[in-house]
Amino acid sequence: MNKSMGVAGRNVVVVGTQWGDEGKGKVVDWLTDHAAGVVRFQGGHNAGHTLVINGKKTALQLIPSGIMREGVACFIGNGVVVDPTHLLLEIERLEAAGLKVRDRLFISESCPLILPFHVEVDRAREALRESSGVGKIGTTGKGIGPAYEDKVARRALRVQDLKHPERFAAKLKDLLALHNFALAGYLSGQTLSFEPIFEQAMKMAEQIRPMMADVGVRVHAVNQAGGSVLFEGAQGTLLDIDHGTYPYVTSSNCVAGNAAAGSGVGPDKLHYILGITKAYTTRVGSGPFPTELDINAEGTVGHHLSTVGQERGTVTGRARRCGWLDAGALKRSILINGISGLCITKLDVLDGLDEIRMGVGYMLRGERIDILPLDADDIVACEPIYESFPGWEGTTAGVTRWDDLPENARRYLERVQSFIGAPIDMVSTGPDRDHTILLRHPYLG
């Protein structure tokens, strides 16, 4: 069984600093060796974390990555939207692989539920945007946005409602009538019936009820007992509903500050913020991307990043757009999150390139700026400014000591660090747990 091995009650928040897919799952799994509990605090099963342990891949979407460590408590905080059907399928898949899940997974009673009509509305909206020529947002079509809308409108069905069939039925009738009205009258989508949704929800309630919990109180109790906690973010800072490239964003706050609001603990309990950053940049879905490269032409850097990096979405399987590291965007993320230190991932993907480039600013309508603008239209108008670095011979894959990296790789990382003004505390050199260079431990200091 894992125990807290660092400073008693010390908590770490892990967030993505780009457009998601930075490799947070592997880092969370690695850090969980020093944690008594792991908390997911936002998003839903639109997020995907791929873990490689002893060469075996495991993909998680809703359940915290800490589930892969025996004895670690896993919490789904109130900031997460929960699709109960997907939740139980993910639990069953993990149990089939031999993991004990239900006795250490705790779900906040305040989580809003994603129900079938949310999925139908999500997909119908994207289809309408595409047919009208407006352009798709690029959602995963899993009902995340509509579920968050119901939460903000104070009409959501929540996990706690599953304990009260009559209350659930009354709220469901009203909510379903609202969404069916939109589906039939505006979105040209498929309307849904009450009985199948209600009956399925009540069947699932029997399995979910034992895992319901007051997550904020439980996390506080872990800290009080001397245990350290890891807060696991989904997506990335530049997809944040407030601070990302709006409207091409997700429907929740992905930034470190939401670890408190999305789990029910005070911000004074967030002791160290670890930002996960790829050595280059990727993005799934629509939206501006200043340093983007062509991934389709064989022999180009973009194609190299896409193929060597195996850049496909964990949840959707969509090819990720790829480009050079955008340090101007990274500066914005560091400012928003209050980053304590960075973990650079997938450095090994840059092996074999003759030249490495890094975006260090932009020309925006004749003016040079060094931080990503706030307006998506301004970002589209940005022309990236690059610094160039020589590539390196040999491989960084699997390296576990800083001094064993090729000299040019070290110089590249040192320049990233100096430009953004935040320390690089970790470097991930491969997908497995042990492929990690540690310069400063987030828990041990």
Image (cartoon, rainbow, N blue to C red):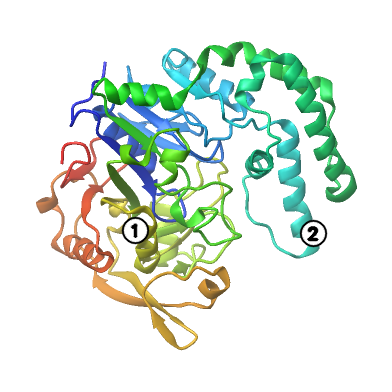
Which residue is outermost to the left? 403
Residue 187: x %, y % from top left? 83, 49
Q: List the residue tagged with mark 2.
A: 131
Residue 316: x %, y % from top left? 57, 43
Q: List the residue tagged with mark 1.
A: 334
Left or right, residue 77 beside residue 130: left
Q: In this view, does 290 lie above or below 338?
A: below
Residue 64 falls in which quadrant of the image? top left
Residue 303 falls in which quadrant of the image? bottom left
Residue 199: x %, y % from top left? 76, 16
Which image quadrant: the N terminus?
top left
3D distance between C-alphas at marks 1 and 2: 38 Å
| Residue shown at 63% from the left, 54% from the top | 138
- The amino acid on which the numbered mark 2 sits, given as a three-letter code, is Ser
Choose mark 1 or mark 2, whichever is in front: 1
Which is nearer the eye, 114 or 353? 114
Looking at the image, is mark 1 or mark 2 earlier in the sequence? 2
Q: In this view, does 343 lie above or below 362?
A: above
SS type, badge 1: helix
- The amino acid on which the numbered mark 1 sits, given as a three-letter code, is Ile
Q: Is residue 444 above or below residue 73?
A: below
Residue 412 falls in which quadrant of the image? bottom left
Which image quadrant: the C terminus?
top left
Count residues near mark 1 (Cα–Cα under 10 Å), then give few for <14, some for 14-19, many for 20+. Answer: many
| Residue shown at 35% from the left, 60% from the top | 335
Q: Is residue 75 above or below residue 13?
A: above
| Residue shown at 30% from the left, 59% from the top | 350
Which residue is outermost to the right? 185
Residue 421: x %, y % from top left? 24, 64
Count residues near mark 2 (Cα–Cα under 10 Å), then give few for <14, some for 14-19, many for 20+. Answer: few
SS type, badge 2: helix
